[in-house]
Amino acid sequence: MNRLGLWLSVALITAALCSGGATVAQQRTAGIPSGTIVDLTYPFDATSVYWPTAETFQLEKDFEGNTEQGYYYSAYRYSAAEHGGTHIDSPVHFAKGRNTVDEIPLTQLMAPGIVIDVTAQCAGNADYLITESDFKNWERRNGKIRPGTIVLLRTGFGKFYPDRKKYLGTDERGAAAVANLHFPGLDPKAARWLTENRSIKAIGLDTASIDYGQSKLFESHRILFAKDIPAFENVASLDKLPVRGFSVIALPMKIKGGSGGPLRIIAVINGS
Ligand SMILES: [Zn+2]
């Protein structure tokens, strides 16, 4: 083969590989929503907010620095409770036999999202319960909540994170501190209305729990989870989202049999 023949062969093979590659890339990108990406996840560190009774996030150094062989190396180990920082509550957290975190279908964790903004209602009332009327008011302005939506509740408490005194109502730790928790959450009556009248994939909010701080029976958890609807808690940056017109991708750590776990949640704002 002369040099021209060799070049042509290489060019043809390269073109074939490139066109094949491009098709795959197009197929892949076609399925990924395009637009501005908003990270709705807080970093995990020593300040991450955990329930007063739960083990907090610890990161310990195994090795960090130059090795004897001359290359840089770092490795750490971490430990934490499942429920802290930005995380998911799996249905099994409050409903026996419902999905564990590894069992939640991925299709339930990727969907169009909406924001119900109750910042004004929560401004002077840390014990505010998000009501059925809050959802109906949203629907009056934006249309009925579509089947398959991920609903995000914006209480405005995200601006306090990770100041536990302001965010949780107390910075004390231990079982006695639980009675002093004050932050907004979803009214169990609204949870029931949602599960019975709308078909949502998941729900999330910018507080530590889908039930408000003063809840004793965690009824909203129980009502949602009985229907296999998971909850995202300590969701960040809800003030960066429009009320609709975005997609949510919320992928938790796949802990086998887990009742929840750390969550990487992002939003992609349509056409931006
Ligand atoms: Zn939780």
Image (spheres, helix red, strand yellow):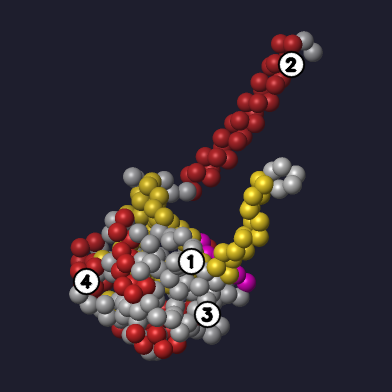
Rounded to the nearest whole Å, what is the CA distance between mark 3 and mark 4? Answer: 32 Å
Residue 260 image offset from top left, x and y in percent: 52, 73
Residue hosting label 4: 123
Give the mark toward the camera: 4 or 2.
4
Rounded to the nearest whole Å, what is the CA distance between mark 3 and mark 1? Answer: 27 Å
Q: Is residue 33 left or right of residue 212?
A: right
Q: Earlier in the sequence, mark 1 or mark 4?
A: 1
The residue type indicated by label 4 comes to Ala
Q: Nearer the viewer, residue 23 or 245?
A: 245
204 over 188 or under it: above or below: above
Residue 1 image offset from top left, x and y in percent: 79, 13
Residue hosting label 2: 6
Residue at 67% over, 47% down: 66
Rounded to the nearest whole Å, what is the CA distance between mark 1 and mark 4? Answer: 28 Å
Q: Secondary structure at mark 4?
A: helix
Task: Find the magenta span and give its range.
Answer: 251-256
Q: Which mark is residue 92?
A: 3
Q: Earlier in the sequence, mark 3 or mark 4?
A: 3
**In the image as oriented, which residue stretches furthest toward the right?**
1
Give the mark toward the camera: 3 or 4.
4
Residue at 43% over, 84% down: 222
Determine the image quadrant of residue 155. Answer: bottom left
Q: Secondary structure at mark 2?
A: helix
Q: Nearer the viewer, residue 46 or 229?
A: 46
Q: Earlier in the sequence, mark 3 or mark 1?
A: 1
Q: Which mark is residue 29?
A: none
